[in-house]
Structures are given as structure tokens and as C-alpha cells.
């Protein structure tokens, strides 16, 4: 059994990916912390031969001499694969499905040591354009229903390689958390006749209480119901359900705010270890009005403990307005 | 703002506890690993004065000379409090609720260094009886709708003190994950006319494929749709929705299996760091037939990364029958 496969819990309506090959993936960061200049990095230029051939590459004016500025490759240890294969039988008790999907790595810079906060504005805009290109391409496959772009930065956030990169997983099902967000947004739209996140942005911009930084086309705020201390959401100011339809200017504004959060976290928390997750509307509903795409930025300080795991009920020791005030103070 | 309070995310129908006092709680384990004999332990006998007065204590024949065998105290840094206080206003956008609830610590042994696997059978049975006593007591408070008993063992699992203990949180809302399980069980019962977990136990006992260990009244198995590698559920063999109604014999069987899992994990994974979570039916539905209480035992090896966090879609590198086979092999 080497192919990934999807299984569903008997009680909870959530799919799980069983991906046996991933158990063998490299754990560079468990052995060497950050300063990996002496160790071999598969994501650095000149080492391209050890990764699968690229799916797409983008040039960047910030790295005129590099062979590429941003590079998308298939994950060498994919959780899902685009090739069809026969899936085992489901029965009344146990549901399974073939592990159809895509799992890509977006190498965000040819320079091993740079982070988003050190990228030129143009280059970080290019990273979001690369995400967008990949999402536009993958949605053409009608077997796929949604894509999640995410980033594990630092070993405590689950990163196994330190070279700056993000990942994209496209799925044959809408993942549970995105589904809950989309349902919540739809319900709000039916009840209030407007987009929930437009209403949130309006309220937050008016009070300023939970806003951390903002610019022309986007705001970065600590959401009212934050699960984690110092959790940040970055939202385009204007209503838009679908990340794949965002303009270059909006992507640039979002990338600029995300990179501003990192040094603020570093000062406030002593670390920028985090997960970043892009929540865009599932492919089939791209034309619907009720959703509003956004980036979740989740700092990984402290451990998620048994209560949260067991209950999906989070205990957060820092109210979001307190976190926002502190980060604003550092920003000024 | 020092009182805990509940808030709800605008989109996702899940409450979050904002508990500002918990930011200051001790993090003994971050500084000293396991061997804490020289450091001060607030849970050891003779140090009772530093904790709040006990809610309930139980004698244990295994510790005839100790002042108590098992001891329940209020958490000194509670996520919720039983006292009413005025809760702030909710509005159409942001919902809040008073942080009514209980947060107790169950100190499971007077001996600092003992773990479940070293407890006498009688003593580990007594720990589950203590959980049951506390749950029976708390459900009398009609403001509370459910209780979660959980355990953080080891720093990677979120433990802040090494002395063996579990915790109980009773809530004014049914937590999201329990709610999903209960709904799933209800749906299965409506569709199939029987309890989902009874059907699962029957199937697993018949095939033996995912059973790890079993005894008179309980089975320990790796569930088909495991989110985590080597995840184990312990279930009473006979149908029972409500943990608070379980007989002493059933509790003893469940405690015996849980303690058998720990040394198997230690051999297989090199660590027993884990979270344990008791899923019993919410208080209001205690008489309903469709649920089946069980313990989830979740090993904490590796980190949960951005994809899982952002999507509630878990990637598991070890199929549960592979994990079960390996643990069975070690057990024999």
C-alpha cells in the first residue's frame, strides 16, 4: 500500500488522507536549527536535479542572475497524486476514496536565507501571483473541488526544510474548516443581506481596535474570535470571494501586510514560527457573492493541548484587541 | 479584563475561551525535563497549601500512608469559572457569553514519579472513578451542557507540570468536536438502526485487523479513519452513551487497556507523550441510545502543520491497521 488514499471517520464527517510515503520524508530541521548553510538544500538553485521537474517557474526582477525567481514543483512526498488509480471499496461502515489531488511546493526564492520580510515588494507580490497561477491551472481539473495554499515556517510549525517555501494541496473534497467558513458566510449573507467579512472589516476599520496594519487594498487584523494568541487575518478591503480573481494590486497589498507582521511577531513573541493558510472559495462556488477570501496567519508559540484537540474548543490567553494594540505599538 | 469569557468566530460556529489569567501559568516543563525531583511540585503531598482547597479526595489502597490517593482541585488558572458574572453584550456581528463553567485538576497519585503504567490496577480504576464522581457532581449544575476530561502528558502534548494529572472542563456549550461526533452517531443510528460504534467494535473484533489489546469489558483499537499515526480509541464493549453511568468493572477494564498502550507506544515511538480525551454524551442527552462513550488516546510525535490547522484535513502517514499490527506484535 503505497498510494495515498482518503478515508472517512465513522462519526465525524471529515476526510483523512492516508499517505504512507510521507513517513519517509526528510526532517532536516529536526537535526539542524535554522543555520543550514553547510547542509544540502534541495530547494537551492543548482540542486534542481534532486527535485521532480518544475511544473511552472517565474522570473523575478529581484534575482536577475538566478535561473528562476519562484518555482513550483510537485511535492516529492505527496499527500495526494493527480493520477487516477482504482480506489478500494467503501461499505456501510467505512468510506474510502482514491487519493486524487495535487500537492505542490512553491519555492519562494532562489536565496536560501531570505524570508518574506527581506523580499523586495515586487518579489513578494510575485509569490502571491505564483499561488494564483497554480490555483487557476489546477481548477481546470474538474475532479478537484478546492485548493489550500499554506506555509509551515519553522520546525514548531511543522516545517521540514528551512528554505523559504509554501505548499498547495488541491482536493477532491472541500476541507472541513473551509466548508464551515463558507457555510457560516453563506448563512450570514442570507440573514444580513451582506458579506460577513465586509461587515467585519467595516466595524474594525471604524473602531481601529483590532487593526494591526493596513494599506491601500488590504487590512491586517486580530480577529474577534481568535483561536490563538496573536493570530492575524489579512483581508482584501473590497469584497471578493475568489483568490484566483484578485488583481495584482490587491495581491501586492496583501503580501506587503503579511511581510509587515513577521518582524512585529518577532519583537512581540521572540519568534516568527507560524502557519499561513489561504482561504479562498471552493472552485464550484467561485461566482457566489457570500465569501471573502483571506489569509490566516497563525503563530506557533506554545503547544495545542488535549482540550483543544479533543473538543475543537480553543483557550486563548490573549484577547485579540490586546494583541493588536501591542503589535500596533511596536509598528509605530 | 481578568474574567474568562466566551467568544464566537463570525464565520465558524465554534466558541473560543478568552482566559487572560492563563497566560501567567507556570511552565515548569519548559525549563526542566521530566526529572523534576529537585524542583518544587505543587501537586505533591505536603504542598497542598499552594493549591486551592480540594473539591473532592479519594483514598487508595495503593497509598495507605498518603493523605489522599486521588485529589480533585480547582485549576489555579481556570479557563472557566463557576461563578456568574455579567457577560458583555453580543451584537449582530460578535457573539460573547460569560465564561461559566468548571475547570478542575485531578491529581492522579500522591507519588510524583508514577505514571499510569506503574499504577496498581485498583489505583488506575480509582482514577476513572474519580472522573466519574466529578462528572456526576458537575452535571447537577443545569447551566452546564457537557464535560471533557483530558490529559496532557509530556511537554509536546501541552503539559506544564510533570506530576501525573488529568483535567476536567465543564462547559455551557457542547464543544464542536463532541457535537460533530454526537451528530454523526445520531445520523448513523437513524440510517442503520444501531449504534455506529457497536457496529465498529463488532467489525473490528471479527477481523482483528485494527485491535491492539482487549479484555473483558473493553477493546483498544486503531480507528479506521485515524487522524494521527498510532492514534488509539478505547471503547467499552457493551453499548453505553454515558460515561457517568459506567459500572466499576467497565471503568477498570478501560483503565487497564489505557495503561497497556503506554509501554507499547514507548517501544514503537520512543515516547509516551500524548493527549487523552474522554468523549461522553452531552448532559442533556444522557438517556439517548445513539452514542457510545470512549477514550481517544492521541500520541504527540511530530507537529501538526499548516494544512491540518487550516483545513481540518489530516494527513496520516501510518494506516491504522499497520499501526495496530505493529503494536500487537510488541504486545506479544
Image (spheres, coloured by chain):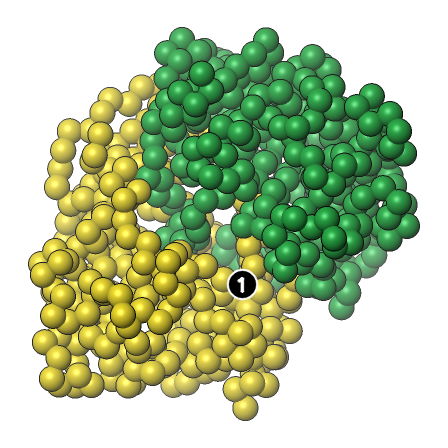
Chain colours: A green, B yellow
Is residue B206 visible in the rendered image? The answer is no
Report the number of numbered marks.
1
Residue B161, percent from left and from top: 31, 61
Residue B251, percent from left and from top: 30, 76
Drawn side of residue A68 relative to residue B88, left or right: right
* Snapshot quadrant of residue B65: bottom left
Residue drawn at 81 percent across, 59 percent down: A86
* Snapshot quadrant of residue A23: bottom right
Residue A186, percent from left and from top: 52, 25
* Snapshot quadrant of residue A286: top right
Residue B184, percent from left and from top: 47, 52
Drawn side of residue B124 relative to residue B317, left or right: left
Residue closest to the eye, B77 or B240: B77
The relative height of residue A266 versus residue B196 in the rendered view (above or below) is above
Residue drawn at 37 percent across, 11 percent down: A207
Mark 1: few, some, or many residues within 10 Å (few <14, many ≥20)? some
Quadrant that contains the N terminus of chain A: bottom right
Residue drawn at 17 percent across, 68 percent down: B71
Residue closest to the eye, B249 or A324: A324
Is residue A226 visible in the rendered image? The answer is yes
Element carrying mark 1: loop
Chain letter for the residue marked with disc 1 in the picture: B
Residue closest to the eye, A264 or A143: A264
| Outermost residue toward the bottom in this view | B332
Drawn side of residue B183 relative to residue A87, left or right: left
Quadrant that contains the C terminus of chain A: top left
The relative height of residue B209 versus residue A129 in the rendered view (above or below) is below
Residue drawn at 34 percent across, 83 percent down: B118
Residue that carries the numbered disc 1 in the rendered image: B301
Amino acid at each position: 500500500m503505497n498510494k495515498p488514499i482518503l478515508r472517512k471517520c465513522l462519526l465525524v464527517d471529515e476526510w483523512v488522507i492516508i499517505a504512507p510515503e510521507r513517513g519517509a520524508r526528510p526532517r532536516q530541521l529536526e537535526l539542524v536549527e535554522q543555520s543550514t548553510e553547510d547542509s544540502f538544500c534541495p530547494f537551492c538553485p543548482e540542486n534542481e536535479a534532486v527535485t521532480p521537474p518544475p511544473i511552472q517557474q517565474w522570473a523575478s526582477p529581484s534575482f536577475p542572475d538566478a535561473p528562476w525567481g519562484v518555482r513550483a514543483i510537485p511535492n516529492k512526498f505527496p499527500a495526494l497524486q493527480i493520477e487516477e488509480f482504482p480506489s478500494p471499496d467503501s461499505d456501510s461502515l467505512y468510506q474510502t476514496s482514491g487519493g486524487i489531488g495535487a500537492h505542490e511546493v512553491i519555492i519562494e526564492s532562489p536565496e536560501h536565507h531570505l524570508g518574506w520580510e527581506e523580499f523586495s515588494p515586487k518579489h513578494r507580490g510575485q509569490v502571491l501571483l505564483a499561488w494564483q497561477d497554480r490555483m487557476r491551472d489546477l481548477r481546470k481539473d474538474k475532479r478537484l473541488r478546492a485548493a489550500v495554499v499554506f506555509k509551515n515556517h519553522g520546525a514548531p510549525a511543522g516545517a521540514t526544510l528551512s528554505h523559504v517555501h509554501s505548499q498547495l494541496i488541491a482536493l477532491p473534497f472541500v476541507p472541513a474548516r473551509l466548508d464551515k467558513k463558507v457555510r457560516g458566510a453563506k448563512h450570514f449573507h442570507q440573514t444580513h443581506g451582506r458579506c460577513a467579512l465586509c461587515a467585519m472589516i467595516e466595524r474594525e476599520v471604524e473602531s481601529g481596535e483590532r487593526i494591526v496594519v493596513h494599506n491601500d487594498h488590504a487590512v491586517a487584523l486580530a480577529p474577534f474570535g481568535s483561536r490563538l494568541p496573536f493570530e492575524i487575518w489579512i483581508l482584501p478591503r473590497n469584497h471578493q470571494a475568489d483568490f484566483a480573481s484578485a488583481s495584482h494590486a490587491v495581491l501586492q497589498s496583501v503580501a506587503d501586510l503579511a511581510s509587515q507582521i513577521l518582524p512585529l511577531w518577532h519583537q512581540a513573541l521572540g519568534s516568527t514560527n507560524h502557519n499561513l493558510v489561504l482561504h479562498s472559495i471552493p472552485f464550484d462556488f467561485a461566482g457566489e457573492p457570500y465569501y471573502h477570501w483571506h489569509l490566516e496567519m497563525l503563530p506557533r508559540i506554545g503547544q495545542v493541548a488535549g482540550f483543544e484537540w479533543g473538543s475543537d474548543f480553543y483557550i486563548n490567553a490573549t484577547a485579540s484587541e490586546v494583541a493588536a494594540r501591542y503589535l500596533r505599538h511596536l509598528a509605530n
